[in-house]
Image (cartoon, grey):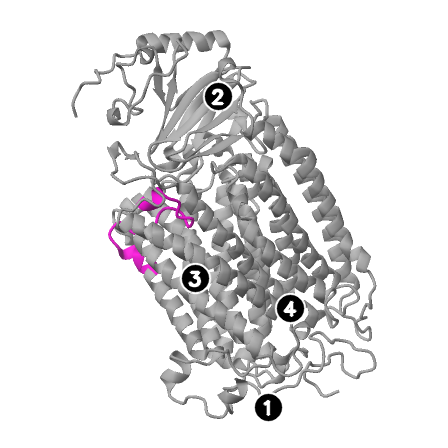
Amino acid sequence: MNNIYGYGLPVAASTYASKIDFGIWLIHAAMITIFVLWSIFFAYLLIKYRRRPGVPARREEHSGELASLMPDIVVMLFEIGLIVFYAIPVWGKIKMTLPPARDSVLVNVEAEQFAWNVHYPGPDGKFGATKESLIRFSNPIGLDSSDPAAADDVVVANELHLPVGKPALIHLTSLDVIHDFFVPAFRIKQDIVPGMDIPIWITPTRVGHYELACAQLCGFGHSLMRGDVYVQSQADYDAWLKSRAAAKPKTAPATEGF
Amino acid sequence: MSDAHGAHAHGPTSFWRKYVFSTDHKVIGLQYMITAMVFLMIGFCLMLLMRWQLAWPGAPIPFFGRLFPADLAPNGVMSGEFYNQLGAMHGTIMVFLGIVPFAVGGYGNYVLPLQIGAPDMAFPRLNMASYWLFLVGGVVMLSSFLMPGGAAQSGWTSYPPLAVINPGQTVWLLSMVVIITSSLLGAINFLVTAANMRAPGMTLWRMPVFCWSELVASVLLLLAFPPLEAAAVLELMDRVFHTSFYMPAGLFVLGHPIHVSGGGQPLLWEHLFWFLAHPEVYVLVLPPMGIVAEIIANNTRKPLHGYKTIVWSMIAIGVMSFIVWAHHMFISGMSPALSNFFLVTTMIISVPSVAILTCLIFSLKGGSIRFTTPMLYALAFLPLFGIGGLTGLPLGLTVTDIYLHDTYYVIGHFHFVVVTGSILALLGGTYHWFPKWFGRKMNDTLGKIHFWGSVICMIGVFAPMFPMGLAGASRRLYDPTAQVHNLVVQPLNVVSTVFAYGLFLFQLPFIWNFFHSMFRGEKAEENPWQATTLEWACPSPPPHGNFEKTPHVRRGPYEYSAPGRKTDYWPQGDPA
């Protein structure tokens, strides 16, 4: 896991990671160029116009008006280009479109202080019903075991398994406060707001073990709120899901009183 | 109005009325400044504690660790709750009790009436009320450390539901209401003063850039703070009376249901908070830009390049700053379609900012640059604030913000803006106007030591944050080593911390210089910098009522090196 993080950006492990990286490096190249050119000009002015005996200041009368507009024009053109050809189209792809649910791996992630509850529909592809009144320590998402669809559901803590090359459609909810779903290698970051159900999507491109971390201050244990992301081949993923669905302990019947 | 105030001769004579409960704008200005410097120092010390934990997580804090109660720092090791308290209070203190009161309450109060030729502020008693409310709000804010459960620990942004369920936030909200009220009183006062109390001949287009910057900042405070005040009262209601303005139904905290009626929306708070907090950024930045403009004009011995461009850009920034707030919320869960609008407004607001910086640099052209201590600060402001501005670009762009949001990149960005930008300019302003305030000069050698030490250390503290952010290190982590992807860049946290302690050491010559020069410094005459603006036309320090007789303004603010004159400066009030 260590060799994918270092100085610079982490390994790019999702389909849109390279698009985001392109923007980051392009802007940094532009920023550094602007700053270097500008610093040279600045140093030149400081040396050339330092106070020297017998050389008075010259009031420039209407000189260089156009030249002083140049930085603004350059910056403006660069920004218009970024907005029109990069930010709006790429943002639309990442945040404003979702893959169709039937072609995707469906996952619900429910965040709480300070853990990630990851809920898979299991081999039947249907999420079991969840009820607030059933939430307790042993059943953090309140899965209703009387629902037949819940029988093969898989609920794991702090582990997210995804098959490589297939879009994952993840619905994010929170039990208590605002959290943030951040997987640096996927370049995905999304606040999870209590009371809202926020969908995101990822298509992992690289088998491996990555880190999921909370990126929004959520209380005293915020820095401990992390999880592991395992991107596996489809076969490995299916085997894992099946073994978890079979190994699942039968949850207590819903009729159990408080 | 100015005539009704009458002669300057009869100021108050008792110690209490003259130096403590004073209505004189100069005394209030200095009270604001010195109080704000104390708060800046306190906020800085909180950060020094946090930096220890960030560099060496879990190591006991040396010397001071044992002084804290066991629930905050068991065996001298900082707890997660304590870390979050320090973080929330650092941000709050630096912004609301440090820089804003320093730049607006302090410089605005002292310098603005003098620069427009007024005998005092329009409403002297309101002015006094504003200072004392600020002090009360600040003391209440600090006292929250002593409350059961400690101080606020939900970030300076106070996002619900965390801020509603966490301890400490009630006192924070009460204090914020008091501080905001103080700011509103001040803002009204500045606007009325600049509108009504200008000396004869001081047209708007003859006002120094600094006055314009204070004017725009006051409009921002006046219009942006009321929504936050209302929002803070609502959050207070959520905490104290269990209303649900920001609380959705069905929440479970650590396994227990919390019973609220529901129907609230945390995003509402985020919108109201950032509707203030973004204009607030410009309140932090515009007056320092004004200070830099004054110092540059004075030390290049020539008029500013593009005076009107600078002023119009400031006004444009002021207007635009009200419609960029949600660029803090690209990944907050608000509609992604909305983000495109705020992306465009954010890029638009960078245009006037670049224009101001360009004008300030072009002002150097053709000059006869004196490298005085204040000028060093003003010059350092230009490239360092430039770094702050440039690094805002990938954060203001929706796509790249997905990755960089809430990482150390953000921390690096805004600290370059407010520390190597605002604070550097405010310190430069202190060296520039000190002779006017106390009739004595500050020591130049100590000033230069302070300058070089501070600038190098500031860069050392904040520059490592950019590579950390690019590597994906999140902000607000009590233990950065708990997350695997942070481990590689952890040495940069150590670098940052070492420079932070260096920065502290280099403030000591300043503190000594400030208080020693106040009483023992070399005597300064009326106009030691040979400046043109009106504050240099009255005695140093100015008496009660400021001007011996009402000045008549005959020309623009920066008539340096005018052709055909013996001296290279032509004060605004000099007869033709």
Q: Which of these two is toward me, B118 or B100?
A: B118
Q: Respond whether the residues carrying marks 1 and 3 are from the same subunit.
A: yes
Q: Residues within 10 Å of mark 3 (few under 14, many from 20)?
A: many
The disc placed on residue A169 is 2
Distance, label 2 to label 3, CA atoms, is 45 Å
Amino acid type of disc 4? Val
Q: Secondary structure at mark 2?
A: strand
Distance, label 2 to label 4, CA atoms, is 54 Å
Q: Which of these two is toward me, B190 or B548?
A: B190
Which residues make up the magenta segment? B141-164
Q: Chain of mark 4?
A: B
Residue located beneath label 4 in the image: B209
Query: Taking A90 as reference, is B424 above or below it?
Result: below
Distance, label 3 to label 4, CA atoms, is 24 Å
Residue located beneath label 3 in the image: B97
Q: Earlier in the sequence, mark 3 or mark 4?
A: 3
Q: Chain of mark 3?
A: B
* Label 1 vs label 2, nearer the camera: 2
The disc placed on residue B549 is 1
Query: Taking B262 as reference, is B423 above or below it?
Result: below
Q: Chain of mark 2?
A: A
Distance, label 1 to label 4, CA atoms, is 24 Å
Q: Is residue B79 visible?
A: no
Q: Quadrant of residue A172?
A: top left
